[in-house]
Amino acid sequence: MNYLRVIRNNWKKCTFGAAVSVYALQALKTHIEIEQHMREFASNIQTNWVSDRPRKVLVVMNPVANKKRSEKFFKNYCEPVLHLAGYSVEILRTNHIGHAKTYVEELATLPDAIVVAGGDGTSSEVVTGLMRRRGNLCPITILPLGRSVQSASKRINIFGVKDVNYVKSLSKALEPMLKDESQYQSVIRFDVINEEDGSDSQLKPIFGLNGLSWGLLEDIDAAKDKYWYFGPLRHYASAASKSFADNWSLKTDYVYTPPCPGCVDCAATVQRQETVQPSGLFTRGLIKYKNNTGETKRPLVKNDNCSKKFEGSAEASQININCVQNKDNFAELESQFISSLQPGWEFIKQIPEVTCSNILPSLVVKSRTIQLHPDGEMGEKFYSIDGEEYDARPIKVSVVPNAIKVFC
């Protein structure tokens, strides 16, 4: 009874003490589980995956990714694993937009592998730098260290610094590289189009793994961080700021070529791109890649539909272009035009649940290449290519099949 009387007379102190005790016990439990997992993972590495020869790995790290915690995660849970497996680790800390792209493109000698320690933007820069090079390309692995690494962590939820599942996801992302398990992945190429004659611009192309997003949903997602002072309601605040704007609709003309598994015309197009040697500060080394997949190549045949062009126009509130593997097992572009979004309070209330994956598009275009020609002045409209913003201008989107090797 004395204990109950003490608790009743000092219930605030007791509640605070109990909360602190529970938090401390949970933190201790998490720490022990992480230590146990890392010890088992290290033992497995020493037994099975130690490299026979020294290998060099370039780690491209965005130190400000994931609220400036990516470097801490990598130092604690990834770098010791690489050293233990016999890798020589070189770290590049990016300090401005385009840093990784330029560095990888101008490397005198590529390492045995490149580890991307950042978000979607960092992976896009690394892929772009590699694809602009000549000759064979080194494989890459993507660690889920950014807030949104779509290609590497679609089903991984990041709960906190000391979360066991997150540490396990980092180990799982490194395993394919340690086991030397990789596969070739198609990438998407983006070229600016000259408005005068409709030809490809002499600006260097951009490459990405995830695709292009343009429209209302992308604007809302990109602007939500500006409303940080709303806390968990910042997504609603961003949706409210966009919902009653006058520029909901996007109007664009498009020109596309049908999907092609690979034919004589495709091979000739690639060969012409590889022989281009433009000059000038922004045009040197436009692109020359070697698509050495190590797989049995499809026999080149004549495809009369490959060079055909189909035109159309669309008005939509959201446009998404992604690279998918079709039922015939070759890569193609899937362009979704979504026009079913309606402004109002119902849209604002449902915005956290509204994603492009569960909205039925009004038009779907399957293609090998597609050109977008935005109608009129786009103002502050931007394309989002792998999470990076680019001005909305006439653009050609192409699929480059089996272009880069990814550990996965």
Image (cartoon, rainbow, N blue to C red):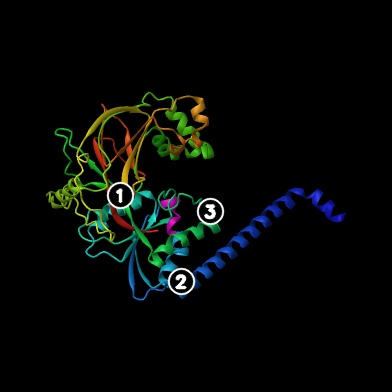
Part of the protein shown in magenta: 65-71
Residue 370 sits in quarter: top left
Q: Amino acid at mark 3?
A: Gly
The answer to whether residue 162 is visible is no
Above or below residue 102? Residue 236 is above
Q: Position of residue 341 (x, y in %)?
A: 43, 28
Task: Please provide percent x and percent y for residue 47.
Answer: 47, 75
Residue at 50% from the left image edge and 29% from the top image edge: 348
Q: Residue shown at 47%/64% (left/top)?
A: 77
Of 48 and 33, nearer the camera is 48
Residue 187 — which label? 1
**Image x and y of residue 217, in percent:** 41, 34
Q: Amino acid at mark 1?
A: Val
| CA gap, disc 1 and disc 3 | 31 Å
Residue 335 numbered mark, or none: none
Query: In this orientation, which residue lies closer to the viewer: 156 or 327?
Result: 327
Which residue does the image show at 63% across and 58% down from the upper left? Answer: 26
| Quadrant where the image shows the C terminus | bottom left
- The residue carrying mark 3 is 160
Quickly name the residue at label 2. Answer: 45
Residue type, mark 2 in image: Ile
Quick one: quadrant of the N terminus?
Answer: bottom right
Query: CA gap, disc 2 to disc 1?
Result: 31 Å
Per the image, label 3 sits on a secondary structure element best described as loop
Q: Earlier in the sequence, mark 2 or mark 1?
A: 2
Count how many numbered circles sit on residues in the image: 3
Dot 2 and dot 1 residues touching (CB under 8 Å): no
Mark 1 or mark 3: name the one nearer the start of the chain: 3
Report the predominant secondary structure element of the magenta stretch: helix
